[in-house]
Image (spheres, helix red, strand yellow):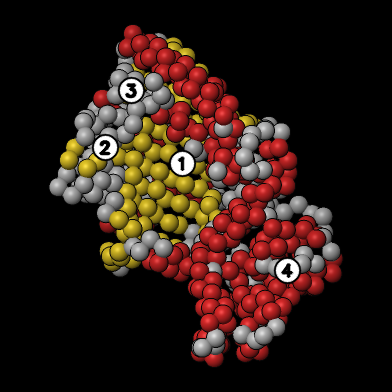
Amino acid sequence: MASSMMLMMALMGGGGANDLADFIDTNSYWALQSVEVTLPAMKAQLASADASAAVTLCKDLIGDDEAKSRAAAAKIKSIGMAAMPHLEKAARDAQGKPEKAARVQNLIGQLYANVQGPAVRRLMAIRTLGELKKRDALATLQPLLKSKILFEAEYARAAIAAIEGKEFKRPGLLAKERMKDIWLLPAGCGVVGQVTIPPGKPIDIAKVIKTMGSMGGGGQKPQDMLPQLTSMIVMAAGQVGNVRIDAVTIGVADDVGNRSGFVVVIVRGLYDTKALKQMLLQAARSNTETIDGTEVFKPDNEFAIFLPSSDRLVLVAGPRKAQTPVAEMIAAVKAGKGALAADSDMGKLIKTVDTTSPIWAASKLSETYRKESLLAPFDTMTMTSKIANGMQTFKLVAVGTDADKVAQAVKEFDGHMAEGRRETAKHAERMPAIKPMADFIASIKAKADGTEVTVTASMKGSSALMGMFMPMMMLHAEGPVDHGPIEKHDDAVEVKPAPGPR
């Protein structure tokens, strides 16, 4: 498990990826599909699926020739759900022959769990043609530039550029579009933040593994985990297709507790709406509710998700007894404007922040937040980040009114951090996977200047996706908000958050 965790952290920390397919290793993928990585094989993957061919393939599937049966199963997978009527007939024909019937049922199950598999397969074939860099592939790729299928035209442009030795930059989300999501948030936010994930490209996983080799550690070797990791990602992609994340916007209520507050998360990117809806219905067994004409998925009593378009997803969460702003967010998305006003105190604070930062946040500390002793002296906090030369740096500025209380908070903070450094360094010796976390915590420094405190930190890597998790530790080191003792509800028991490093 440690090796698997280390591999995932290394992949995320490597930077440059914002598609789910970017995390799929080409060679491992085609090995799982039992397909040789050659130009003719890749061209064959992009040939129009002929569902009529499934008639003969299904006969081979339940035939006596094992080799033909395995080959038929692989080809049926590439056809996808269009082969289902023929598979159902094969299932009937195989009745009374347990081994052959099981073979058919197993394949049917794989197709239902891998509905988006053929679409991902095509994207991987297009990408692989670019990686092979053979000009003979251009005739196959050129027509795909006009494809209306999600991601295909763009992947074809990238592959053609690779073959021609030209640079290709994946389109990203414009700053103007990204900031629109900030002003969709509801009023009453005590914390507002945003993570921008720059346009990426496939990760060189072999290079990442080579880097990990120098990190040491026991247990399973990272390279042995690659097929397993690839299989996990392919399984996820088979359900939802390729998914892109360009930016994540977060708003947290200024009054958070066991019975109050909310968290709103707006994800911008690109995904197959129908596939994600189906996954939410099947995997999470979500209840659904229609609010103002919008279908809302509710995996439980504390989360609500709605999918207004193929480039935006909205999640609203809060305690089950709280009134969360689901209907308000639906109305805001439709109107293109929420209740968070630019001339409000929070709006004015946001304007003081460099919102071009890959990761930034602003907080107006309410009485609820200031119940924690470390936060008590402060009125506002802002955080920004920079990425340069393979490093991410973070800067948090907290402003109060009483210099003595601010100085005492910094002293307390330093004590907590000293203990945190010792503990994480100790754990990192046994578990190399958490070394990036230990290095990050070791880099955190706080400096007081009258009523203002500046906290700085840094981490290796240029991945905003990984970097978004590190500031949480930076902020959590300031201490959690204490909402009082455990509170018993009539239908649940909720426990207050665990304390920060002590």
Determine whether, in the image, residue 344 is placed left or right of residue 398.
left
Which quarter of the figure is the N terminus placed in? top right
Residue that appears at 85% across and 66% down: 135
Quote the CA–CA distance across marks 4 and 1: 41 Å
Quote the CA–CA distance across marks 4 and 2: 51 Å
On residue 406, the disc is none
Residue that appears at 69% across and 79% down: 66
Task: Tell me the kind of residue under disc 1.
Answer: Gln
Q: Residue furthest top?
A: 404
Position of residue 143 relative to residue 160, above or below, is below
At mark 4, the secondary structure is loop
Mark nearer the viewer, 3 or 4:
4
Task: Tell me the kind of residue under disc 4.
Answer: Val
Name which of mark 4 and mark 2 comes first in the sequence: 4
Mark nearer the viewer, 3 or 1:
3
Quote the CA–CA distance across marks 1 and 2: 28 Å
On residue 495, the disc is 2
On residue 194, the disc is 1
Q: Nearer the viewer, residue 422 or 306?
A: 422
On residue 35, the disc is 4
Name which of mark 3 and mark 1 comes first in the sequence: 1
Check contact, mark 4 vs mark 2: CB within 8 A: no
Is residue 73 visible in the rendered image? The answer is yes
Q: Can you identify the residue that label 3 sits on?
A: 375
Which quarter of the figure is the C terminus placed in? top left
Task: Tell me the kind of residue under disc 2.
Answer: Val
